Amino acid sequence: MEPPDFAALNLTHERPSPGHPLCEAWGSRAEGPVFHLAHILLFLGFSGGSGSYGRLYSFTLLSLGFLCSSLESWSDPCTVESLLWNLALSCACLGQTVLVAFRLRSLSFSGELRGLYDGVFRRLGVSLAHFGEIIACSDPDARVLEKDHCFAVEGKTAIDKLSVLLTGRVRVTVRGEFLHYIYPFQFLDSPEWDSLRPSEEGFFQVTLHADETCHYVCWRRKKLYLLFAKHRYIARIFALVVRNDIAEKLYSLSDKAVDRSGHRYDLRLPTFCHQPATSVEEADEERRVDPLQH
């Protein structure tokens, strides 16, 4: 006598569907190298950084990773949905890669402006996109200041812009007495800019004289304040770089303001501007040539 089939008598027992067989054992065949390469690329792509170059890195690796997943799915005729989804995601990431690369290419700058970005803004974490907006707000082309010409005259030139020296050297004097030099990637008028509110007007209290042919870029006050109102991040960046430039100028004056006995002058004393100009110029040159001594 055969034993009864209890599974058949149990009405709650669910029979497996013939179209979807159950997995009774783990497969013994290891996945191919394309499968592992796809997941490695996906991992690296999802760990990309921020910014334009970070997005370019991430989308490039993600497009390659989804493409490898598509190739892996192609070998199995039962994974049509996986193949289509991986292809769609690969195409989407490839489109983003092309878009980011096009935007980066459109943000190409001249050698002087690129040097300004690398020397001042890049170390503060400013992206090329934000730097492009800053440059778009400036005058179209870098201006030229010929040798022996004045950028500003004491008591006569109005403070209506903010300028950065790109090439050359500018001498700063007050009442004919030398104060300091301005070198590339330093602001020409940062103290004057910081001394006025947006609604105030004023005139330069110093004379800026070009020792050699100079190039500089400038921003008009009204356009720059409109940019600040639109982008608070750019406003904070400018506040930081302008005040850092002022601090460097004050340090330069304090570092070289010494008398013949070697004692330093107090910059708060009004007699500082009446010391001999020759000794101050020599000290400024020595400090510029060998900054490691200080």
Image (tube, helix red, strand yellow):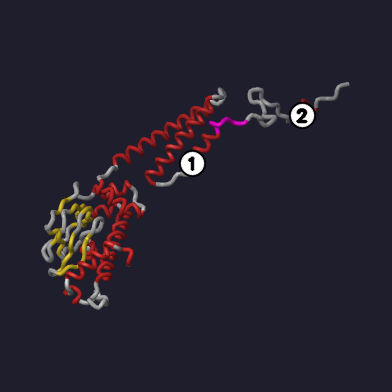
* Residue at image point 12% right, 61% down: 157
| Residue 166 image point, x, y percent | 23, 53
Residue under the image location 56 percent in, 22 percent down:
77
Relative placement, left or right, of 157 versus 32 is left
The disc, 2 or 1, on the residue closer to the chain's N-terminal end is 2
Badge 2 is on which residue?
Answer: 10
Q: Residue furthest right?
A: 1
Q: Nearer the viewer, residue 241 or 79?
A: 241
Corner quadrant of residue 192: bottom left
- Which residue is rendered at x = 28% and y = 50% of the image? 115
Tell me where residue 134 appears, x and y as whole percent.
27, 50
Residue 203 visible at all: no
- The answer to which quarter of the image holds residue 264 is bottom left
Secondary structure beneath dot 2 equals loop
Query: Is disc 1 surrounded by few (<14), some (14 to 19) or many (20+) residues within 10 Å?
Result: some
For the N terminus, give its image quadrant.
Answer: top right
Q: Amino acid at mark 2?
A: Asn
Q: Position of residue 238 (x, y in %)?
A: 29, 57
Which residue is denoted by mark 1 in the rendering? 44
Q: Does the image show residue 88? A: yes
